[in-house]
Image (cartoon, helix red, strand yellow):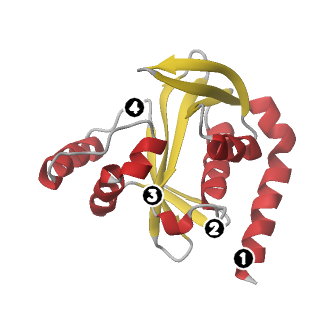
Amino acid sequence: MELVGGKVILRDKLPDDAQMDYIWRCDEEIARLDAAYPLKMKFEDFFRLFRDQLRYPTPSSGRFGIDTQAGKYIGNCMYYDMDTVNKQAEVGIVIGDKNYWSRGYGYDALITMLDYLFSNTSMERLYLHTLEWNKRAQRAFEKCGFAPVTQVRRNGLDFILMEIRKDGWLRTRDDKLSARDVATQETQD
């Protein structure tokens, strides 16, 4: 599958992604932003797990590599815990290549995935958890249309649960996609 945004292309994960994913997962700063510990396992062990996830994907989830329009792999986004009864799923994103932070690539990737999920699945609600202290991420998610719901404590950490509902997305969809396209055009000029 391939989803084309303004600055990014979301595509199915590939075995070739493993090396960069491993580097990003071992990075202390990225791990901290993801409420995780940096990986300590050897690449060979990581690659076996990575390969198994590609071979046997979880049916209630989808994982995408994020490429720039020029084909550079810069991160990942995903949906998981898709609940077709309650019509909701959790989403997540990481721009692993720090050269692409604060440049609109995360916004473009998330908007592209939201549009896909609300247009092609029965999902009525998408939600995420972001660390309470990560105001930068919260502002980015709000820009995409997510609203804070409540504070949640997990594994000794405080998170903000944020959500976006399909009806709200449909009201702002055209504006979000237009803003994405304008931002893309400005960076190309």
Residue 84 in the figure: left or right of residue 7: left
In this rendering, the answer to whether 158 lies above or below 65 is: above
Q: Which residue is mark 3?
A: 96
Which mark sits nearer the N-terminus, 4 or 3?
A: 4
Q: Quadrant of residue 52?
A: top left
Q: CA distance from mark 2 to mark 4?
A: 28 Å
> Residue 35, how many percent across, how many down?
44, 36
Which mark sits nearer the N-terminus, 4 or 1?
A: 4
Q: Which mark is residue 125?
A: none
Residue visible at 71% across and 80% down?
188
Which element carries disc 2, helix, strand or loop?
loop
Q: Hey, what amino acid is under mark 4? A: Pro
Estimate how packed mark 4 is, as few (under 14), some (14 to 19) or many (20 or more) residues with alpha carbons within 10 Å: few
Q: CA distance from mark 4 to mark 1?
A: 37 Å
Q: Which residue is mark 2?
A: 7
Estimate how packed mark 3 is, as few (under 14), some (14 to 19) or many (20 or more) residues with alpha carbons within 10 Å: many
Q: Is residue 110 visible?
A: yes
Q: Hey, what amino acid is under mark 3? A: Gly
Which mark sits nearer the N-terminus, 2 or 4?
A: 2
Which mark sits nearer the N-terminus, 2 or 1?
A: 2
> Residue 43, how many percent across, how many down?
17, 54
Nearer to us of marks 2 and 3 is 3
Q: Which residue is mark 1?
A: 187
Residue visible at 17% across and 46% down?
41
Which element carries disc 1, helix, strand or loop?
helix
Q: Quadrant of residue 107?
A: bottom right
Estimate how packed mark 1 is, as few (under 14), some (14 to 19) or many (20 or more) residues with alpha carbons within 10 Å: few
Q: CA distance from mark 2 to mark 1?
A: 9 Å
Estimate how packed mark 2 is, as few (under 14), some (14 to 19) or many (20 or more) residues with alpha carbons within 10 Å: many
Of 114 and 142, nearer the camera is 142
